[in-house]
Amino acid sequence: MSEDTTPEATEIHELDEDTVARIAAGEVVERPASAVKELVENSVDAGAETIDVTVEAGGTESIRVADDGRGMSEADVRAAVRQHTTSKIAGLEDLEKGVATLGFRGEALHTIGSVSRLTVRSRPRDGAGAGTELVYEGGDVVSVEPAGCPTGTIVEVEDLFYNTPARRKFLKTTATEFAHVNRVVTRYALANPDVAVSLTHDGREVFATTGQGDLQAAVLAVYGREVASAMIPVQADGEELPPGPLESISGVVSHPETNRSSREYLATYVNGRAVTADAIREGIMGAYGTQLGSDRYPFVVLFLDVPGDAVDVNVHPRKREVRFDDDDAVRRQVDAAVEAALLDHGLLRSRAPRGRSAPGEARLEPGTLDETAGRSDADDGIDTAETSTDREATERPSDREADRSSGIETSSSPPTEPLDDPATGEPGHSTDPGETGSAEPAEPGDDRIRDEPTARSPSDSPANATGATPGTEEPTPVEGESDSDHTHAPDRPREFDADADRKFDGPSEQRTLAGEVATGDETEFESLPPLRVLGQVRDTYLVCEAPDGLALIDQHAADERVNYERLRDAFADDPAAQALASPVELELTAIEAEAFESYKAALERLGFYADRVDDRTVAVTTVPAVFAETLEPDALRDVLASFVDGDRESGSETVDALADEFLGDLACYPSITGNTSLTEGSVIDLLEALDGCENPYACPHGRPVIVEIDEEEIEDRFERDYPGHGG
């Protein structure tokens, strides 16, 4: 370009500081709870012994956080509201070696003040004279002047998002926003039992911890006596843990019977920071195994200590998440620590499958086979494809488990299922000849299973790979089999491979769920396509043949849809309810107690009538009658938990809308669960009921009920369009 050439005009330009500040504020301050989190973290980092949090209207009108920490001088206060100013790290080196403080980005006061009217009053702990008051509005310092105030810092936030109306419009209901505030303050109260933390909402104290350093006392303050008495200690470090990055794990977890339907009460911390991480949660739930139902979660307060260079806390704008350098190792360490604590208190059975005692060692006896060895598990209605990921499914009845037969004689105990792999928790591979696909029981004297040689003999040469041995006749092929059917390893008897070791060997007749020969009849429906039931997968999904391919149906989602629409119709006029012989008192957690006030009318609309006994206890007098069953009074807590989890738009909190959401949750109770074996008749009944639904294709929570795999997709998967492979 020559010197006299004028640069072309461009639409790319630098944003002004005010716009940049508001954009940055959106990343850090998402809702009132975000501001509370940043301010409480600053108080903890300041060494406060007392932290008082007060909010109005869920934090949408005002937030006040007061502490007795180190405090700030006038120069400190002026600097604190500027962007990217902090006393907690000096540079990149501090960030890379691990951040020891909760805050470190230098954004909190600046970004909160960019979208609110912020007032900071502070007085240094070791200073003399008056404190300082700074008023900061919309990113501008309005005034700085001396002020009388106690030692420590008080931050008041008014009219959050007043200058960003679009963001304020997307705030949720008052109850929802306060639930988020409550969650944040609870997390830090539990993480710092040596700090007295209190939370007040609309003039009423929600909870207050003592600050005496007792974690059990902190749990008592926020969750109540019932939960606190059910907590057991967890403590593992050093050689007590499997190899991995964690140096120690400590805290408390609840008895399996003390649980909720929400993850709300899984409080986990890494180096004192409240975070969420899939590896930690999966380790916790893995330790409980089948002791909890598929939708139940324990109360947990767990602290993980890890070297700073093994975890990255700078992966989320609001520091909610962390990244470990070895997620799998963390999962194993958490699983081992929690499981050990539960076992020490006799709250878990052994890790043998389904919690049964570990079987003794089994040994193969040459030439022997239990008379039931060939019986297939299909005859018992039991799916053999169990995996440890089925922990979320309900446990099968023990009498059905007892029907399993291994067909292998043991030296010390009756044969049972194989042990779990101790390293992964996955089920071991069965050596049961009866599970290899052979549907016929062996006759007495049957010598198909033979003693396998421990070393190759001269006869095991390639020349004898067909299975013939010197001086013996070639085994007679089974009628209907060709030589190609006898593919096998050269050092194994041919008969063993043909009958017991062929992975895909099995009966050729299509069987019904009852084990009878399938008729091939289809069932005609009005809304659903014609379906021919073929069977179940993992006792959870129905497999049906449809006109255009295959249909997989989630039996729980299907029954949930049926029950939801029945409930909706039944509750449309007059909800069925059952008065209790005497009131049942329920102790609520702090967050449940607040939710009760907001949702009491919706609870009554469904048939839950309860009166407050004190700040944390309600007396239930009437409960909904769901079909032929009457719900237990403590179901009220689960219903409240579902609202605590939800994010409802402001203005959508009508009684009818809340009641409809309750019905979706209540529909789960009587519904068929996964991991339940069904007869063909019950499947047809379920499909006919589903066919009568207004919307048979989704459960009330929006999950799909039916997944169709069309014929074209099946042909593509089998590459039937490959040249020369038609037909």
Image (spheres, helix red, strand yellow):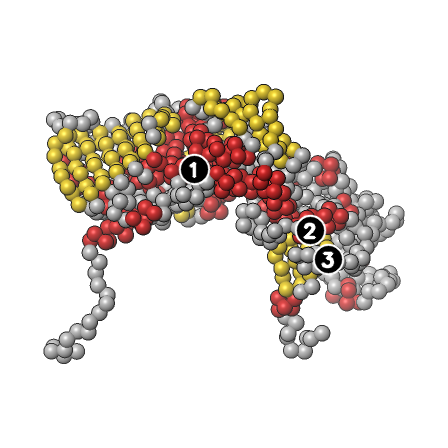
Residue occupying the point 52% across, 42% down: 661
Q: Nearer the viewer, residue 482 or 592?
A: 592
Q: Which numbered disc, 2 or 1, marks the residue closer to the eye?
A: 2
Q: Which numbered disc, 1 or 3, marks the residue closer to the eye?
A: 3
Q: Is the residue under label 3 in contact with that under label 1 (CB below 8 Å)?
A: no
Q: Amino acid at mark 1?
A: Thr
- Nearest to N terminus: mark 2 or mark 1: 1
Q: Eyeballing the image, is 552 above or below 444?
A: below
CA–CA distance in space, label 2 to label 3: 10 Å
- Residue 160 appears in the rendering: yes
In what element is the residue under mark 1? strand
Please state, as top left, top right, bottom left or bottom right, where the N terminus lies in the image.
bottom left
Q: Is the residue under label 1 in contact with that under label 2 (CB below 8 Å)?
A: no
In what element is the residue under mark 2? helix
Residue occupying the point 62% across, 66% down: 713
Q: Horizontally, is 615 left or right of 463 in the view?
A: left
Please state, as top left, top right, bottom left or bottom right, where the C terminus lies in the image.
bottom right
Q: Is the residue under label 3 in contact with that under label 2 (CB below 8 Å)?
A: no
Q: Nearer the viewer, residue 66 or 457?
A: 66
Characterize the local packing of mark 2: few (<14), some (14-19) or many (20 or more) Cα atoms within 10 angstroms.
Answer: many
CA–CA distance in space, label 1 to label 3: 52 Å
Q: Position of residue 54 (x, y in %)?
A: 31, 31
Q: Amino acid at mark 2?
A: Leu
Residue occupying the point 13% across, 28% down: 130
According to the image, label 3 marks what residue? 524
